[in-house]
Amino acid sequence: MNLPNKLTLLRVFLIPFFLLFVYLKMPFHYLISLVIFTAASITDALDGKIARSRGLVTNFGKFLDPLADKVLVIAALTVFVEIPEIKMGAIPLIIISAREFMVSGLRLLAADSGVVVAAGMWGKLKTAFTMTAIIFSLAWLSFVHDFSIPFPEVMINAVDNWVIPGLIWISTALTVISGAVYLKGYWHLIDSDK
């Protein structure tokens, strides 16, 4: 097994530990979750870059890499729905999940037609922004809960009620745009029955 595939497997392996530490009510659990999620996000940036630069692209990597990304992000957003300080709600999670199912379906149709659906600029931007928003949110939770930093109440309210939800909704908008770009680009595979 090559290095990029090992990095992708490491990302998959880190997901249950990320979830475990988010839910464990122990000292610095948000900080540990932040470190784990950040490490998993870094493996996402590295595995594809290494695979392409060294000619190590494999079918295993093409299959597992996007799946690992989706599971990591959806796991974090699902957890966020349950954290009271993150006023996200379920709607962004539903929209983002629906887009991921749609793109996965398009990839299956494309593969059946012998077409490879490469990650486009909007998809990469969506992934990078969403992971950054999640990292910011985890860092904020760590500052407030793990380190008990006495931020002014007005700042806590602004971050909890506006900044974090705003970041999540920007991620959702980027998700919709990237989904629409994929759908437009590969619509001929869906509409080929005519």
Image: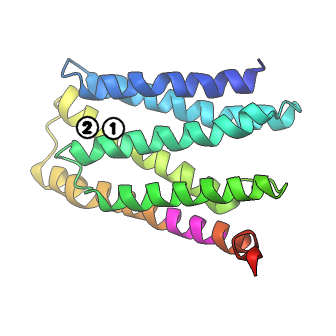
User: Magenta region: which residues?
Assistant: 174-181
Badge 2 vs badge 1, beta-carbon distance below 8 Å: yes
For the residues marked 2 and 1, what is the alpha-carbon distance in whole angstroms? 5 Å
Is residue 127 or residue 2 the one in the foreground?
2
Q: Secondary structure at mark 2?
A: helix
Please determine whether, in this image, residue 127 is positioned above or below residue 180.
above
Please determine whether, in this image, residue 28 is positioned above or below residue 164.
above
Is residue 138 or residue 84 the one in the foreground?
84
Q: Secondary structure at mark 1?
A: helix
Q: Could you tell me residue 132's position as x and y percent?
A: 47, 46
Say which residue appears at 45% left-offset and 54% top-offset: 97
- Residue flagged by tag 2: what amino acid is it? Leu
- For the question of whether residue 147 can be seen, the reply is no
Quadrant assignment, res 66: top right
Q: Decide: few, some or many residues near mark 1? Use Cα within 10 Å; few <14, some 14-19, many ≥20.
A: many
Pick out the residue farthest to the left: 153
Pick out the residue farthest to the right: 55
Q: Main SS of the magenta segment?
A: helix
Query: Does residue 173 appear to the left or right of 107 in the view shown?
Result: left
Q: Which residue is mark 2?
A: 141
Say which residue appears at 71% left-offset and 25% top-offset: 5
Say which residue appears at 46% left-offset and 67% top-offset: 173
Q: Which residue is mark 1?
A: 138
